[in-house]
Image (cartoon, coloured by chain):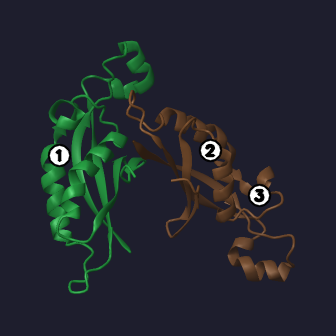
């Protein structure tokens, strides 16, 4: 089995807020991230696909296809957006790095399984060069 | 739903690779320049990976503030700008980065409530790193 990873970057803003909590509790748990005006990051997305190289092409997955898939399914909706206000998944879910990794997985899983023997193995989201979260599916 | 949260840190420390069980010649042959009696130092990169359920209320596996607090008090205050050979952990074992990685894993293990420490990675230089995993996913 070969694990192949493609990186992509996007820039977006977000804030952390739980509507069922008081303002005080939000500030206590989320600190500066609770500022309702939002703040932004340069995110790096790492998409790891696992599979056997195709005997004819030598590819686990066509990287150009993977790049296009990431751009179409994720970047087109997320890049230069306010995640809380403009992205459907985060209307009611806090856009933490963990939840961003899960949402990216859900957007990419089907497109990767289609057309090749490969499958999505892991999505890692870097919020800064020192902070990341990753998701490997529900299994 | 289970996910993982990762965080990176840096610390600077000195060490000397020397085993009391080996002769002076054997130490020099085994550890080369790292056996210099006066020690030498590195800027270590530290990565910790914590696994657990994403809390429905916070959207987090673990609060980064709690991770920073644990790493600061248990690791950085202990090892940053220190000579590793002087630490009690390395009185009876050589402070190779393999042993340092394992020591950091043991010091941090069980520090994150219901979330579990999954991996500790210690980068000794830009060209070598060491990883210690838990067997749990």
SS under mark 2: helix
Q: Is residue A3 left or right of residue A58?
A: right
Please give the residue where the numbered disc 1 appears in the rendered image.
A79
Q: Are marks 1 and 2 on the same chain?
A: no
Residue drawn where x is 55% and y is 36% of the image: B114
Q: Colour of chain A?
A: green
- Disc marking residue B76: 2
Q: Residues within 10 Å of mark 3 (few under 14, many from 20)?
A: many
What chain is tagged by disc 1? Answer: A
SS under mark 3: helix
Please give the residue where the numbered disc 3 appears in the rendered image.
B85
Q: Does A137 sit above or below residue B40?
A: above
What chain is tagged by disc 2? Answer: B
Q: CA distance from mark 1 to mark 3?
A: 48 Å
Q: Colour of chain B?
A: brown
Q: Is residue A11 left or right of residue B57?
A: left
Residue drawn where x is 38% and y is 20% of the image: A26
């Amino acid at each position: 089995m070969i694990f192949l990873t493609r990186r992509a970057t996007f820039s977006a803003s977000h804030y952390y807020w739980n509507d069922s909590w008081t303002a005080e509790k939000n500030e206590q748990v989320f600190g500066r991230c609770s500022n309702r005006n939002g703040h932004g990051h340069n995110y790096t997305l790492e998409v790891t696909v696992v599979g056997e190289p195709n005997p004819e092409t030598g590819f686990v997955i066509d990287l150009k296809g993977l790049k296009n898939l990431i751009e179409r399914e994720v970047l087109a909706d997320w890049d230069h957006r306010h995640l809380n206000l403009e992205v459907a998944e985060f209307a009611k879910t806090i856009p933490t790095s963990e939840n961003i990794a899960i949402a990216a997985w859900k957007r990419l899983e089907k497109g990767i399984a289609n057309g090749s023997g490969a499958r999505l193995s892991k999505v890692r989201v870097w919020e800064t060069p020192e902070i990341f979260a990753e998701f490997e599916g529900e299994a | 739903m289970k996910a993982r949260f990762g965080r990176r840190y840096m610390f600077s420390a000195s060490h000397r690779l020397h085993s009391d069980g080996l002769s002076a010649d054997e130490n020099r042959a085994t550890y080369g320049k790292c056996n210099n009696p006066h020690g030498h130092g590195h800027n270590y990169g530290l990565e910790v990976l914590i696994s657990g359920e994403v809390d429905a209320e916070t959207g987090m596996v673990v609060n980064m503030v709690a991770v920073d607090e644990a790493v600061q008090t248990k690791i950085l205050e202990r090892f940053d700008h220190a000579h590793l050979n002087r630490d009690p952990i390395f009185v009876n074992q050589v402070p190779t980065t393999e042993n340092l990685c394992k020591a950091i894993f043991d010091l941090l293990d069980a520090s994150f409530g219901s979330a579990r420490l999954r991996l500790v990675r210690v980068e000794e230089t830009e060209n070598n790193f060491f990883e210690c995993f838990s067997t749990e996913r």
